[in-house]
């Protein structure tokens, strides 16, 4: 499948490495950096979705396969992005759709499949292009910086440098009711604080952040991957990682059997969604929530990481509504993202979406689909070598996310902070992503405040009609979520 000439040009996939100022070595290192930064999804997705009754082994395989296929499509689109089941979307699948609304996991997968079809339809009909074109420059800059803040927050969280104190009565325990084995949902009484740096893992986490900062500041080639590998190796010396394959390999055959029983369930369960007329409105509202979140998570990631790095040129983004068919890399990337969700649901996982952690590989120099191809290959290998993949501790990859956050904060300088009708929406878009732990919610807040402030300031003509419609859809989504 992969062919490279003596000049480093990749013929089969037409990566055009020279055109984008990169080479095979840089792209492969970037792909590895992206993979190790997002590999946590293999185990986390399993732990969340298996609570609904989907066999755990099947979820692990579905996560690996769907991620590999989705990322391979990005490679064909020649962009350095990776796809996997989205965090937040998998939690919505489990805790809201299955536990809260009482749908079976088969029905929830059917909703995800339909969501994928809807996303594909709005992509093919250019609706997503017009949405991107309607976003004003100030919000585009805010979204890019906001994703950086969001990524950095994820990094700090993954490094276990945060602790939360919850007031009595401000949280609920989901699952079997045991606080040690169940998910705890805390209210506003949870106050964050920095932990005491008094254990070996925490000390190593801080040292990893310092190491990566130094390597990046010195512009050392492969700085991100070098830091992750060194941190993991040091962690192994302290006995903080495990490489036990025995139990996993013994159950791998059973996992494939479980996957066979799950595959295609999403399509077979569609009729049951509409069997009860009393639930049809609820079903439509839930699919709408899935779709809106999925669409804007991707749009935010592409705008936030693509424009500032040159993966998508300013001209390409600004003229996206006028491009014909799928002639640009952004067009093809949107199509790849839209297709992946339905494919993932067939294998038995929640919405597959473009991962914001792809920014780690981009920061490492990834500019073409060879980065994505490398990441896809890693997901395939992780089917067999999952214990080795999961041995990389969160605090080893966390520094990559923090440093990427620093790099992505640059667009804040492009916002006109003296014009409050621009500054207020930009602030909400940039900060609410991290505060609410959701790219789409941050974008929604930015859109809503943009429309409100422009109308109040007598500048309603600045609001693009498509942006106005999308803002109303966001408001409707918030209302529906409140009702369900």
Image: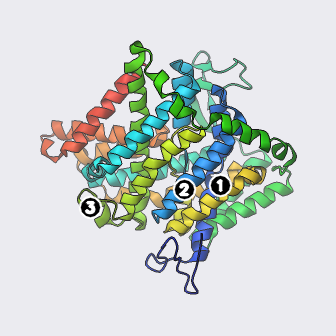
Sequence-wise first label, 2 or 3: 2
Depth check: give the residue in front, 281 or 316: 281
Q: Are marks 2 and 3 in contact (CB under 8 Å)?
A: no
Sequence-wise first label, 1 or 2: 2
Residue 332, by quadrant, is bottom left
Residue 201 x %, y %: 76, 48
Q: Which mark is residue 71?
A: 2
In the picture, which quadrant includes the N terminus?
bottom right
Near mark 3 (Cα within 10 A), the count class, few <14, some 14-19 or many ≥20, is some
Tell me which residue sits at (50%, 19%) in the image. 101
Q: CA distance from mark 3 to mark 1?
A: 33 Å
Tell me which residue sits at (44%, 41%) in the image. 116
Depth check: give the residue in front, 479 or 202: 479
Q: Is residue 146 visible?
A: no
Tell me which residue sits at (53%, 21%) in the image. 103
Tell me which residue sits at (37%, 20%) in the image. 281
Q: Which mark is residue 323?
A: 3
Sequence-wise first label, 3 or 1: 3
Q: Is residue 171 visible?
A: yes
- Taking the image as shown, residue 174 lies to the left or right of residue 315, namely right
């Amino acid at each position: 499948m992969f062919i490279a000439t003596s000049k480093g040009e990749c013929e089969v996939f037409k990566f055009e490495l020279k055109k984008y100022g990169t080479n095979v070595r840089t792209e492969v290192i970037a792909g590895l950096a992206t993979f190790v930064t997002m590999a946590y999804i293999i185990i986390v997705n399993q732990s969340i979705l298996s609570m609904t009754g989907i066999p755990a082994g099947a979820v692990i395989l579905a996560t690996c396969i769907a991620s590999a296929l989705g990322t391979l499509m990005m490679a064909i689109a020649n962009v350095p992005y990776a796809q996997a089941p989205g965090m937040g979307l998998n939690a919505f699948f489990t805790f809201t759709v299955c536990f809260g609304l009482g749908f079976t996991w088969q029905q929830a997968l059917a909703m995800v499949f339909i969501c994928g079809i809807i996303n594909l339809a709005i992509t093919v009909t250019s609706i997503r292009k017009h949405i991107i074109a309607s976003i004003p420059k100030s919000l585009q800059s805010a979204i890019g910086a906001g994703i950086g803040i969001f990524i950095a927050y994820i990094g700090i969280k993954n490094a276990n440098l945060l602790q939360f104190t919850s007031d009595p009565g401000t949280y609920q325990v989901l699952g079997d009711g045991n606080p040690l084995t169940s998910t705890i949902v805390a209210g506003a009484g949870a106050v964050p604080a920095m932990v005491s740096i008094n254990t070996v893992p925490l000390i190593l986490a801080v040292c990893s952040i310092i190491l990566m900062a130094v390597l990046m500041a010195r512009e050392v080639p492969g700085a991100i991957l070098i830091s992750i590998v060194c941190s993991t190796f040091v962690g192994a010396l302290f006995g903080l990682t495990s490489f036990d394959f025995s139990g996993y390999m013994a159950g791998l055959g059973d996992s494939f059997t479980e996957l066979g029983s799950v595959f295609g369930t999403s399509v077979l369960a569609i009729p049951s969604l509409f069997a009860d007329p009393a639930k049809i409105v609820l079903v439509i509202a839930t699919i709408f929530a899935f779709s809106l979140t999925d669409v804007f998570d991707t749009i935010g990631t592409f705008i936030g990481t693509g424009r500032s790095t040159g993966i998508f040129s300013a001209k390409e983004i600004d003229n996206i509504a006028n491009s014909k068919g799928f002639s640009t890399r952004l067009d093809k990337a949107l199509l790849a993202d839209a297709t992946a969700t339905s494919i993932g649901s067939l294998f038995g996982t929640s919405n597959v979406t473009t991962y914001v952690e792809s920014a780690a590989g981009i920061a490492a120099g990834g500019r073409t689909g060879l980065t994505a191809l490398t990441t896809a290959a890693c997901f395939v290998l992780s089917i067999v070598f999952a214990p080795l993949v999961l041995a990389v501790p969160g605090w080893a990859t966390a520094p990559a996310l923090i440093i990427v956050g620093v790099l992505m904060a640059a667009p804040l300088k492009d916002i006109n902070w003296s014009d409050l009708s621009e500054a207020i929406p930009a602030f909400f878009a940039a900060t609410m992503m991290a505060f609410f732990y959701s790219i789409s919610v941050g974008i929604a807040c930015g859109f809503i405040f943009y429309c409100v402030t422009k109308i109040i300031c007598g500048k309603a003509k600045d609001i693009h009609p498509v942006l106005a419609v999308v803002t109303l859809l966001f408001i409707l989504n918030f209302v529906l979520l409140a009702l369900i």
